[in-house]
Image (cartoon, rainbow, N blue to C red):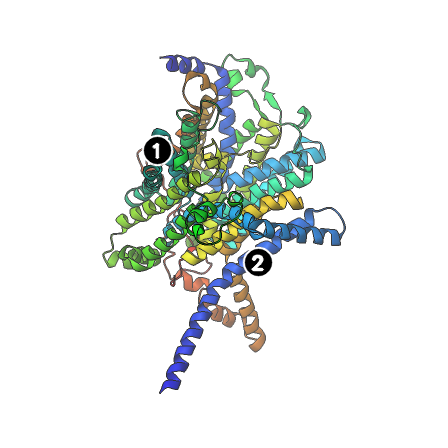
Amino acid sequence: MLFFQVLFRVLQSSDLWNATLGFAALLLLPALGGLISERSGVVNIAMEGMMLTGAYAGVMSALATQSVFGGLMGAMVAGGLMALVHAFISINFKANQIVSGIAINLAALGLTNFLLFVQTGGQGVPSLKDSLRLPNISLGPISHIPFIGPVFFQQNIIFYVAILILIGIQFMLFHTNIGLRIRAVGEHPQAADTAGVNVYLVRYLCVISSGILSGLAGAFLSLGIAGIFNSDMTAGVGFIALAAMIFGKYTPWSTGVACVIFGLGEALSIRLQDSGISPDLLSTVPYILTLIALVGLIGRTTPPAADGVPYYPGSE
Amino acid sequence: MAAPLAAATASNVLTRVRKILQSFAGPIFAVVLAMVAGSIVIIVTTPGSIPVRLSSAAAAYQALLYGAFGNGQNLSFTLTTVTPLILASISVALSFRARLFNIGAGGQLAMGGMTAGVIGFELPHSPGWVLIPLMIVGGAVAGAIWGGIAGFLKAWRGAHEVVTTIMLNWIAFFFTDYLINGPFQSPHTANQTEPIPAQATLPHISDFYNHTLGTFLPQIANPQQYIADVGFFFSLFALVVYWFIISRTTFGYEVRVIGENPKAAHYAGIPIKRNIFLVMAIAGAFSGLAGALQLMGQFPYQLIATTFSTQSTGFDAIGVALLGRTTSIGVLLAALLFGGLRQGGTYMQAFAGVPGDLVYIIQALVLFSIAAEFLTAIQRSLHRRSISRRSGLSPSVIAAAVAALPGTPADREDGALPESTTLASSSESSVSPIEED
């Protein structure tokens, strides 16, 4: 079987695993963002739109400030602002959070294309020069360990940031006061309110965090991986992240594992092109896995109890 | 005797008219607000002095309107967008009636279009009268299966339909791309299929008219410039079917009961699981139909890779269904508006230099406005202010008065909200279907 020979060869290359972890980090940031938001009880299907906004704002502010750092800041602020709109509509106006999320995605698509056209006169942005891109960083001597070095320690700077954020969120959610409050607000806001937790504030902060993380991922995509902004360049990454979050059962560690699995699929789909298996078919795998997980064949996924339910202060 | 009776009827009619007008107020307010906000976007982003900016906004909107409905040809372009949009919107609207959220119209449409295409490619020599019905039914069945999967998972496994339909969308997009790039790829060009057989295409309305009524009535000159196809009539017929299902069948009645009060439906012995499955399957059939008719009615009559995933019909349909308040007539009007915006946007970009992507922003604002019920919120705050001005009451009394208003949070919380604790259970008001159809 030619296919298995190719697969076997590809699986041994450190390139593949390096790319896998790169994709995983790209998925992990919005997935963790969504996780935080949903843990606090606000459904967020708008990571796609927030990423796209971040990707655009990242490139534009990197060009304007002539610094990568400026680009990163711009991306996170833009993602956070989109999330702020979602929070305002969902929390204050008690809107349907799915509708609001769809609106954010549409608005992001329209806004980035519109501004891209207006700001560049329909020309599109040029490729960024290297000094404006997020650098790959080799971590000193450990990056020369055979196989492990190239896979783990020659990654983009955002990869290391994503790992730190993963550990940070896991710790925060389950080992700190703040995490307890977030989970309480997501499971039983009335009880949390009675105990003196400011439900609105917690939800606002969580939704905005999801926007900041998604914006960061957008910057990773445009300033790091691609080095350019293209119209609709997220192309569904935000939805794979959503799938990863659900597949990971709304917990950080498992979401991280899900991101690696989905990242492997993505990396394989590029490298297996000449083996006769369709990259399009491989791309369906994350979604099929998530469906199976939802149905309960790999342990049932249950969202937080108050996920998607607006909170009315003073209600029973 | 007659006078009071007439007065009573008149007041009945008045109440009814008022009710209808009220149901229009929210959607119209949403559209106006979005249009105003859209013009602000143009004014802010156009260079030049204030009068220049204002006039360019006016020119852009004029082009938008003209491009959408300005002449017969532009209208025919708009109708080609409206046809699949109406069908996908019925799909979303029907599921809303059962308090289900079908985000999967896009994927169901893709499966429907693909299946219709495959039937056409596999039976290239069959006559049109065999192929056309076969492709239409095939598309609807494929959509029904795709929607039915989500319905089945919801009814018997409790998997939330929002999440499953998002997953099913992307599976459908990539799977159709695989078929288009693989087994059914054209031998001449990459990333697309061959056109479907010529006898399987639907005629343009103009040609159809010239060959039927036009034989004894005045002919349409230059019929080839009006590209709207007879698929539009299918979509109008589907609206009638939708109205009939919802308001004239037992199934429709059961669906509405489930949507408005699941508990009551349960106690009344309505088979909830079976109906959830059926609603999603029928909704999927409408979307699948949209995909089939889109392929059969419009140039280039072929399937092209990644068009399903980039086409926004499935999401536009959610806006249309909400804006049209899930009624047949509302869906028709809202689909004409959204389809018109889409076509007008292209025209606006070409002739007024304002990017057509503005239309997405306008649509998003319409969605925000409907979802957040800005109009109700404003009315409520005005009401609150007028109470406090009139009598100078203390805040606590005002709070009590506000709580007594219909549609206020305290009131709504007594409804079905507490039980709907699963992911993304809808906040009633924004998607709740209204009584009269």
Spatial CA distance of label 2 from label 1 is: 44 Å
The answer to which image quadrant residue B153 occupies is: top left
Residue at mark 2 = B32
Is residue A25 found left or right of B428 in the rendered image? Answer: right
A184 or B56, nearer to the observer: B56
Q: Position of residue B175 (x, y in %)?
A: 40, 31
Q: Are marks 2 and 1 on the same chain?
A: yes
Q: Earlier in the sequence, mark 2 or mark 1?
A: 2
SS at badge 1: helix
- Residue positioned 68% across, 39% down in the render: A119
- Residue positioned 65% across, 45% down in the render: B351
- Which quarter of the rendering shows the C terminus of chain B? bottom left
Closer to the eye: label 2 or 1: 1
Pointer 1 chain: B
Q: Position of residue B333 (x, y in %)?
A: 48, 56
Which disc number belongs to residue A190?
none
- Amino acid on which the number 1 mark rests in the picture: Ile
Relative to residue A236, is residue A199 depicted above or below? Answer: below
Residue at mark 1 = B119
Pointer 2 chain: B
- Which quarter of the rendering shows the N terminus of chain B? bottom left
- Residue positioned 36% across, 30% down in the render: B124
Relative to residue B177, is residue A90 depicted above or below? Answer: below
| Crowd rating for badge 1 (residues with CA inside 10 Å; few <14, some 14–19, many 20+) | some
Relative to residue A216, is residue B96 depicted above or below? Answer: below
A147 or B238, nearer to the observer: B238
Is residue B90 visible in this depiction of the protein? yes
Q: Position of residue B270 (x, y in %)?
A: 25, 55
Q: Position of residue B93 (x, y in %)?
A: 40, 52
- Amino acid on which the number 2 mark rests in the picture: Val
Residue at the limit of the structure toward the bottom, as seen here: B1
